[in-house]
Image (cartoon, rainbow, N blue to C red):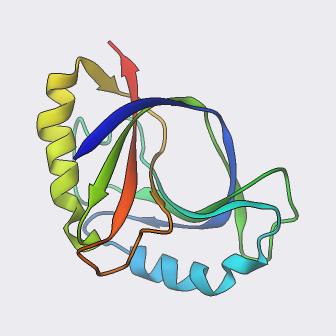
Amino acid sequence: MEVHIENLEAKQLVGMRMRMSFAQNRTAELWRSFMPRRKEISLQVEPVLYSLQNYPEGFFESFNPLTEFEKWAALEVSEAVTTPEGMETFLLPAGMYAVFLYKGLPSEGAKAFQYIMGSWLPASGISLDNRPYFEKLGEKYRNDSPDSEEEIWIPVRKN
C-alpha cells in the first residue's frame, strides 16, 4: 500500500451524519440516505465523496467495538453554503495526515486498517492525532469491486 505524509488545509464539508459503533455499523444506511441527495449541495469543489469518522479522544488506545462515534457522508464545498434540509456542515480541521492508497474490495478495508494501526504506525516514528479520520472516494472508487481505489487519511503528529 502506497503512503505519503500530507499537510491538509482546513476544508468545509456538507453532508449527513449518524452515530454508530463498529458493532452497530450503520454506514450503508448513512450512504443510502446521502447519495440520492448529494446533487442538492451547491458549490461542490470536486465530485469526491468524503467518508469521515469523528472518534472520541482515546478511541483506539482503549478500543471497544461498542464505543460510538460520528460518521459522515459528505462533499467538500468552496465556501459557506445554504445547507440542504437534513444536512449539516462540518469543518475538517487542518493538520498532518498519513495518506494511504488502498486498492481492493471496500468490504476488505478492515485489513488495511489493521496493517496501518498494527504495523505501519508503530514503525513510523509518528503518533495518531485526535482529529477526524476519513476516506476520499474519487472517480476510481467502485463499491463492491476488487478494482476499487480510495485514499485513507489518518491524522498523525510528530512524536
Q: Nearer the viewer, residue 144 or 81?
A: 144
**What residue is drawn where x is 30% and y is 23%?**
127
Q: Nearer the viewer, residue 124 or 85?
A: 124
Tell how many labels: 0
Q: Find residue 89 and report its image quarter.
A: bottom right
Percent across and percent down for residue 110 are 20, 60
Q: Is residue 43 visible?
A: yes
**What residue is drawn where x is 42% and y is 68%?**
140
Q: Nearer the viewer, residue 32 or 147?
A: 147
Q: Is residue 58 visible?
A: no
Percent across and percent down for residue 156 are 38, 28
**What residue is drawn where x is 67% and y is 60%?**
46
Q: Find residue 24 and report its image quarter.
A: bottom left
The quarter of the image holding the C terminus is top left
**What residue is drawn where x is 27% and y is 43%?**
2
Return the residue found at the far right. 82
